Amino acid sequence: MRYPRQYPLAGWIEGKEAMTEYAVIYEHGPTSWGAYCPDLPGLGVVGETHQEVEQLIREGVELHIASLREHGEAIPKPMSTAGVVAVTAA
């Protein structure tokens, strides 16, 4: 490649690993918050606040992927998305 700094390889960001985004579902229960990642089965967290759960799920995704790599297992590609549907209140 003639101009590697001007045209970095696809998925590679100037000497850093490419970022991957996984969908996360947040749920607010009567006494706590929870979150899970549909594309990473078995990964779920619970905390007292939404902020705490955001931090826990981020750490959980990183640890989960690191463990998969360490054990030579395939890293699941992000396939899930989340959306919001607006409806008239009953």
Image (cartoon, rainbow, N blue to C red):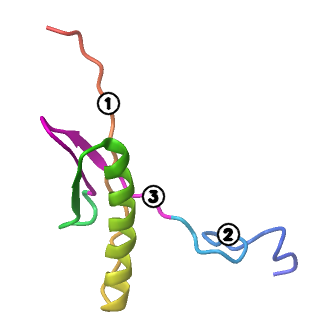
Query: Does 36 appear in magenta?
Result: yes
Amino acid type of the residue tagged 1 in the rendering: Val
**Magenta residues, as a range?**
20-37
Look at mark 3 in the image and give the residue it sits on: 21
Q: Residue at position x 23%, y 9% from top?
A: 88
For the residue pair 62 and 13, the one nearer the viewer reads as: 62
63 left or right of 18 in image: left
Query: Does 74 appear in magenta?
Result: no
In contact (CB < 8 Å): disc 1 and disc 2: no
Could you say whether the residue bearing mark 2 is in a helix, strand or loop? loop
Marks 1 and 2, how far apart at CA: 31 Å
For the residue pair 45 and 18, the one nearer the viewer reads as: 45
Reply above or below: 7 against 89: below
Look at mark 2 in the image and give the residue it sits on: 13
Reply above or below: 74 against 40: below
Could you say whether the residue bearing mark 3 is in a helix, strand or loop? loop
Amino acid type of the residue tagged 3 in the rendering: Glu
